[in-house]
Image (tube, rainbow, N blue to C red):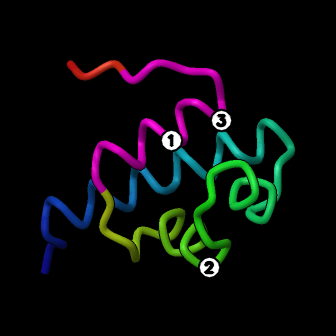
């Protein structure tokens, strides 16, 4: 059985956020400290277990000095 499209998107986005964090050599605690998001929540976001909205993506974008491009 195939996963729900929203779950698949959460997993893909979480994996991308984890990759960005690792590329910048940051820990989950570093992200928590920079964003005010609990480190446990950062872990859930990266594993696709936490539903989040655009506001959270904006917070992450600021950490990585990036813009969000919605196509």
Q: Which residue is mark 2?
A: 40
Camera-nearest residue between 54 and 14: 54
Residue sitting at x 51%, y 41%: 59
Whether tag 3 and tag 2 are in contact, CB under 8 A, the answer is: no
Q: Is residue 44 magenta?
A: no
Q: Secondary structure at mark 2?
A: helix
Classify mark 1: residues with Cα within 10 Å, few (<14), some (14-19) or many (20+).
Answer: some
**Start-end of magenta stretch:** 53-68
Q: CA distance from mark 2 to mark 1?
A: 16 Å
Residue 67 point in image, percent of width and height: 46, 18
Whether tag 2 and tag 1 are in contact, CB under 8 A, the answer is: no
Q: Which residue is mark 1?
A: 59
Report whether 69 appears left or right of 44.
Answer: left
The outermost residue toward the front is: 36
Residue sitting at x 33%, y 19%: 69
Report whether 21 appears left or right of 2.
Answer: right
Q: Secondary structure at mark 1?
A: helix
Residue 7 point in image, percent of width and height: 24, 67
User: Which label's residue is closer to the chain start, 2 or 1?
Assistant: 2
**Where is 51 relative to 53, above or below?**
below
Majority secondary structure in the magenta region: helix
């Amino acid at each position: 059985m195939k996963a729900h499209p929203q779950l698949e998107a959460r997993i893909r986005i979480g994996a991308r956020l984890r990759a960005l964090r690792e590329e910048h050599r940051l820990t989950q605690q570093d992200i928590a400290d920079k964003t005010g998001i609990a480190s446990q929540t950062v872990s859930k976001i990266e594993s696709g277990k936490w539903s989040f909205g655009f506001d959270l993506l904006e917070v992450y974008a600021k950490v990585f000095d990036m813009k969000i491009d919605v196509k």
